Amino acid sequence: MTGTGFDVRALRYEELRPVDANWWEVFDALVRLGELRGARVLEVGCGTGRLSEALAERELARVWAVDASAEMVQRAKALGVAARVARGEALPFKRGWFDAVVMRMSLHLLDRPRALAEAARVLQPAGRLAVASEDPATFQNVWFARFFPSVPEIDGARFPGVETLREELGAAGLGRIRVEQLRQRRATTREAALEVIRSRAYSTFDLLPADEYAAGLERAEAELPGRFEYSFDWLLVRAQR
């Protein structure tokens, strides 16, 4: 994760992104795809460290983690995670040091070709990369896109689709690529959804024009129902060095 925006988001990161059944479903998928149980693992873009902590506690993995946000790293360390401030494009580890690298909702924040090349560099021969990212083919259906019309275009430029991922992974020297799609159903309340927007919980909100953000927030305050359901679509990817 990048920049001071994530230092600020660290204060409420866990509150606005709860660990629930959907979270654990993605966790289990990453463990399976990356063969992370008992492995020597690097998490790139660890945020507050919840994934790394769970890998160590539940899967007996030996985990290291990096994030560009000093505040995120501080919180990860408080969980006992071996985290350090570093960017995914310049990993401070030796070549071939890890059995696996995992990235959960961080690849879109990085210079992907450089970050994927770095992941390949620190993987041992036959090492695995496991990625969880949002599927850009579904951005028209994001629950807040109707309030902020620029969202599909903004995030479509940041999140890689299946073919782009295959090309970039191959260029980084990562092969035997497997892609899985996962649709999850979620539910939230009006107040929780408004708090996501007001706090700019997602980096997307930082990229919106100021007038669009203000108008979209006003519409959301007027139109959101008390409770609603929506879908979230994942791309889950495994690649091997």
Image (cartoon, grey):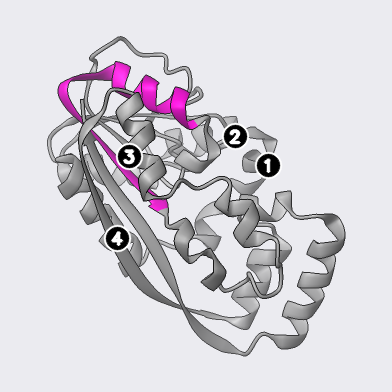
Residue beneath disc 2: 2
Residue beneath disc 3: 166
SS state under label 1: helix
Q: CA separation, marks 2 and 4?
A: 26 Å
SS state under label 4: strand
Closest to the observer, 93 or 219 = 219
> First in sequence: mark 4 or mark 3?
3
- In the image, is 118 to the left or to the right of 108? left
Q: CA separation, marks 4 and 1?
A: 29 Å
> First in sequence: mark 3 or mark 2?
2
Q: CA separation, marks 3 and 1?
A: 30 Å
Q: Amino acid at mark 3?
A: Arg
| Quarter-of-image position of residue 186 | bottom left
Residue 132, compared with residue 194, is above or below; it is above
Q: Position of residue 218 (x, y in %)?
A: 81, 76
Which residue does the image show at 47% across and 66% down from the upper left? Answer: 138
